[in-house]
Amino acid sequence: MSVGIMPEKMKAVVLTEYSASLSGVLRNLQVTEKSLRSLGDDEVLVKMTAAPCNPSDIAFFRGMYDIIKPLPVVAGFEGTGTVIAAGKDGKALYLVGKRVSVFSKDEGDGTWAEYFIAKPENCIPVKEGLNTTQAACLAINPLTAYALTDLAHISGSKTIINTAAAGQTGGFIRVFAREKNIGLINLVRKDEHITKLKETGETYVLNILSNDFQEQLSKLAHDLRATVALDALGGEWSGKIVEAMPAGSQLILYGGLSGQYLANINVLEIIFRQKTIIGFNLADWIKDSGPVNYGLVMSGIQERMMKGTIQITIQKTFKLEEVVRALLQYAGHLSDGKILFIP
């Protein structure tokens, strides 16, 4: 038995098959009417107001993410809305009527829909004053950036190599690194991004496509003692970054924007210069962090958003029915910010 109004059906974007190509992904996403199941005692129903598209969503559609869900399934990993119904569990009932930021990390349906069924532990109460745009994107990019920067700080690294530095997570890493007095070597793929980042006060910005990229990076990494790299790229760039870093350095891999396997890794660097490569999974970090620390971190991130210290950039909003046009827009303009679905 649930408390609140339970609609019978909802509009949703459903993935019917995985596909390695973007054209295949677009064919396999369908907007449909879907029946809503009953709530469990420890579940809530969120009436969605906004849900973004992240690189992890694209990787998921292509079958290249760590989460593989039984299909068909509603797309979307995060978003925001208001809890309108709940099971009889106390933690669920507490959230009724509250605005929340939500994320989907299990095998169930996602957030690109009019409604989303969530566990209370996957709901972050939204502070009064935080707007819908920022609340929709609260759960993944800002928290990933905080956690990665904290790992670099704990390691004692004087400087971070920040890949995809012009992107959303890369931008948040820049903010959190400054808060912890950690230096930055920012890596981008366009010369206009070099200009943009230097206008924000960044000193060291390199284009990974320049002919002398590896030589420049090696000199800076050794001069500035950059012993941690936060890598969203993968592919051949990971090997180039590892080789450029000082002995005893660590590359933390948290994304695969290149769409390629790790490559160009010099085994001598790993064996004789004690360099390491590890993976970062946000869900594991949340679990290891514990509920108290996690709550404090999320509260601090919301405060920064409300002050404007960190801000999610939204390039365009779309209706659920416009999913094909939306993903074409996003894929062609990744550096311009996120797209947002408004049910």
Image: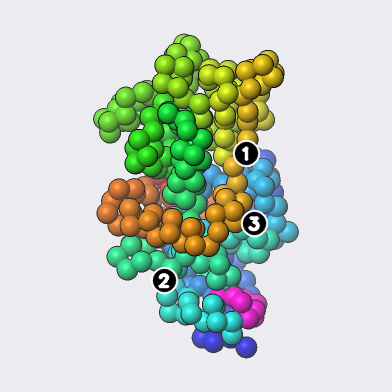
Main SS class of the magenta portion in the image: loop
Q: Earlier in the sequence, mark 1 or mark 2?
A: 2
Residues at marks 3 and 2 touching, judged by CB atoms closer than 8 Å: no
Instruction: Verify whether residue 279 appears in magenta.
Output: no
Q: Earlier in the sequence, mark 1 or mark 3?
A: 3
Task: Work out whether residue 255 or residue 288 is closer to the camera in this orientation and state it.
Answer: 288
Q: Which residue is mark 1?
A: 279
Relative height, residue 46 to residue 104 (above, below): below
Task: Work out whether residue 112 or residue 243 is closer to the camera in this orientation and state it.
Answer: 243
Q: Which mark is residue 99?
A: 2
Q: Which mark is residue 15?
A: 3
Relative height, residue 332 to residue 56 (above, below): above
Q: Position of residue 137 (x, y in %)?
A: 44, 55
Q: Looking at numbered disc 3 in the image, what kind of residue is underneath it?
A: Leu
Q: Quadrant of the N terminus?
A: bottom right
Residues at marks 1 and 2 touching, judged by CB atoms closer than 8 Å: no
Residue at (42% x, 33% y) in the render: 165
